[in-house]
Amino acid sequence: MKPRCTASTVRLTATLAACLALAACTTTPSAPAWVPGQQATVEGQVATVDTTPWTYDGSAVITLATPSGNVDVHLPARWNLCKAPPPQDVQALKAGDRVRATGTVSEPHTLVVCEHAGHGLHRAP
């Protein structure tokens, strides 16, 4: 007697193959949600630098391209009111430079670098 391939055997085999194929897939984990008031550190490449708001006491905005999306890093105009040391050579930053920013989340994908002495914007190694 030879074993016969029935429709249910074929379906079972196809289902198992599909499960194995899906189990072999890898996905990139999603970035954790940023909560206002939370401390965060992000590393990425400079996409844009806008220091124009400093002319009217606003915050300069450095936009970083990161694996989980763009992040705006706000640098207040009045560093004398910040506990963080002022970043060095902001005017010299250009698109493509790798930097690391540590600050307080003010809204999703937005950091303010000012509140703590450990905050800052530095070139990444």
Image: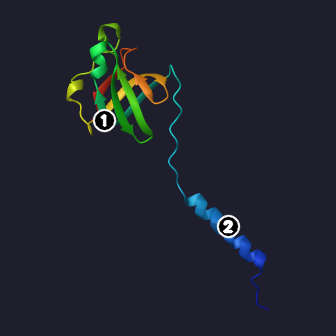
Q: Image point 31% across, 25% down: which residue?
A: 121
* Kind of residue at disc 2: Leu
| Relative to 78, residue 38 above or below | below
Q: Identify the disc placed on residue 46.
A: 1
Query: In the image, residue 4 lies at what x, y percent?
Result: 77, 86
Residue at x 60% of width, y 60% of height: 22
Q: CA distance from mark 1 to mark 2?
A: 46 Å
The image shows residue 92, relative to residue 8, as above or below, that is above
Q: Position of residue 74 (x, y in %)?
A: 37, 22
Taking 112 as reference, is 11 above or below it? Answer: below
Residue 76 appears at what percent x and percent y? 34, 16
Q: Amino acid at mark 1?
A: Val
Choose mark 1 or mark 2, whichever is in front. 1
Circles 1, 2 touching at the beta carbon (< 8 Å): no
* Residue designated by label 2: 16
Is 73 on the left or on the right of 94, as rendered?
right
Where is residue 97 drawn, in percent x and y? 26, 36
Q: Is residue 40 left or right of residue 14?
A: left
Front-most of residues 51 and 125: 51
Residue at 24 percent across and 34 percent down: it is: 94
Label 2 neighbourhood size at 10 Å, few (<14), some (14-19), many (20+)? few
**Mark 1 secondary-structure assignment:** strand
Ranked by sequence position, the earlier of labels 1 and 2 is: 2
Image height of 13 relative to 89, above or below: below
Determine the secondary structure under disc 2: helix
| Colour basis | rainbow
Mark 1: give few (<14), some (14-19) or many (20+) Cα within 10 Å.
many
